[in-house]
Amino acid sequence: MIDAAIMILAYAHDHPQSYHVRQVTYQNVASILLDDRVIFPSQQLFFPPNRLRVIRLPEHFSFNNPELSAWLLSLLPELGEDVETPSTNQMWMTTSHLTKAKRLLIEVSFE
């Protein structure tokens, strides 16, 4: 399951024209939307229709995938001066298929 999650993130990273950054109010969440015509293995598992799927990325994710981690951090909203820089030690990936919008939601939160 983790390999598929990394593949999904790598696809978005490698195809910047394929996603739209979604502005969220949380300072520890990177959120993007992909067109739902993009097909991934295990699509129904990762992108349940109008429901959330949450998985914890392994603690070594950042170490093994420094480019993806840096990219995800770059997608975060501007941090205020009083806000701590998010840690990549604990990362959670939330996904969903937003059927009415015809989009795949991918959010990564840094805890």
Image: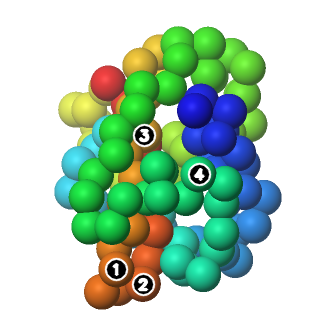
Gap between marks 1 and 4, in whole Å?
17 Å
Gap between marks 2 and 1, in whole Å?
5 Å
Of residues 102 and 109, which is closer to you in this image? 102
Sooner in the amino-acid sequence: mark 1 or mark 4 = 4
Gap between marks 3 and 4, in whole Å?
15 Å
For disc 1, the marked residue is 99
Q: Amino acid at mark 3?
A: Met
Q: Looking at the rendered structure, which numbered label has been put on residue 35? A: none
Q: Quadrant of the N terminus?
A: top right
For disc 2, the marked residue is 102
Sooner in the amino-acid sequence: mark 3 or mark 2 = 3
For disc 3, the marked residue is 93
Q: Is residue 13 visible?
A: no
Q: Amino acid at mark 2?
A: Lys
Gap between marks 3 and 1, in whole Å?
19 Å
Q: Quadrant of the C terminus?
A: top left
Gap between marks 2 and 4, in whole Å?
18 Å
Q: Quadrant for residue 51, please give it.
A: bottom left
Q: Is residue 36 left or right of residue 79?
A: right
What crowding class fits label 1: few (fewer than 14 Cα within 10 Å), some (14-19), or many (20 or more)? few
Image position of 56 with respect to 71: above or below = above
